[in-house]
Image: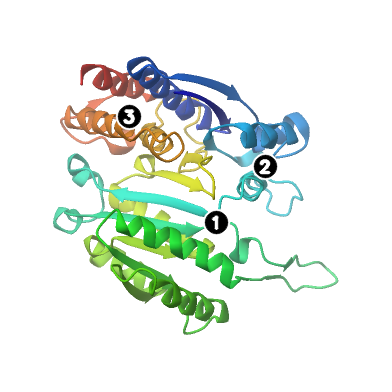
Amino acid sequence: MKATIVTLPGDGIGREVVAEGVKVLRAIAAQYHHTLEFHEHLIGGCAIDATGSPLPEATLTACRAADAVLLGAVGGPKWSDPTSPVRPEQGLLGLRKGLELYANLRPIQIFPQLYEASPLRAERLKGVDLLVVRELTGGIYFGPRQEASEDNPTAFDTMIYSANEIQRIARRAFSLARERRGKVTSVDKANVLASSRLWRRVLTEVSADYPDITLEHMLVDATAMHLIRRPADFDVIVTSNMFGDILTDEVSMLAGSMGMLASASLGATTNGVYEPIHGSAPDIAGKGIANPLATILSVALLLRYSLGLASEAKAVERAVFAVLEAGYRTPDIASEGTTLVNTSEMGDQVVAALQAA
């Protein structure tokens, strides 16, 4: 196979972890005889500094032409003023809109080797294997809004969803559930929000086309509680943009570190954006201690969903398992008796495990 991958390291630790993702992709290409071309572009704070825009037109054009996009992280103290008209996170929102990536997939599978890294007791982590499907291009992040001013001290953000937007994310969730354990939990706030009542109605209507899938509805506050109390009961969770954003950060703590969780942002085509769910972590940037495994696991998703290389994806996931089984850890997941490694060394260990398999 021949494919073009755009890399967007972004800010903070983004460059460090993306480098390890590329390292693994190059190893996969060599081992399985693929040709992968990499083209790096700007996004986020570094793009603002260089061009004045968090998503330069050249970046968006390159991403549209690529087979897949590997993203690091954006933002940092330098650009943290929330009142600024130009902010790094606008690059992410623009990229999702520009590529029409309406579905964000965040798999949560707990590695038994990392039970000690989680704040939850080990017995609550056993069997946890869930997938959050977050609607990515609608809802409150994209609805009409108003900033407050001295003349008008009122601000608002509007949650808007159309039936068509809800239908397409629902179908994606049900289709994914067919490949898993056949259960979808739709999360909303239908007891309060009109948009959530539409969400619940549309999910119920779409479920009629998937009689083999079990659908349950759950309020977002109850979901937040049950994700801690009984996380192994969930299979596929589908929810709106803001609720998904919040819940996936909560669920990341089940794995013990945000440095372990990957994500895929997909649209109607095979071109997608793959990134760790963590941020730019400016406090540890440049120290070589960032955990690259979330990015490497995102590479596995890239291989599976954009390049159609399921065997190669599984090889990467098995390599990560082998490295953890061998006791290698970055500081965020380290415990007594494990071997501490830096960012680059962790990538090297994954490559070595790939080559040894």
On-image quarter of the C terminus: top left
The circle drawn on residue 136 is: 1
On-image quarter of the N terminus: top left
Quadrant of the image occupied by residue 99: top right
Q: Earlier in the sequence, mark 1 or mark 2?
A: 2
Residue 319, given in percent of the width and then of the height, sits at: 25, 28
Residue 106, given in percent of the width and then of the height, sits at: 40, 50
Q: Which numbered mark, 1 or 3, is in the foreground of this view?
A: 3
Label pair 3/2, CB-CB below 8 angstroms: no
Circle 2 is placed at which residue position?
79
Q: Is residue 277 visible?
A: no
Q: Earlier in the sequence, mark 1 or mark 3?
A: 1
Crowd around label 1: few <14 · some 14–19 · many ≥20 (10 Å): many
Q: Is residue 207 left or right of residue 341?
A: right
Q: Is residue 217 left or right of residue 85?
A: left
Q: In 3D space, how far apart are the residues under numbered discs 1 and 3 (Cα atoms)? A: 27 Å
Q: Nearer the viewer, residue 104 or 120?
A: 104
Relative to 30, is 228 above or below?
below
Three-letter amino acid code at the position of disc 1: Leu
The circle drawn on residue 312 is: 3
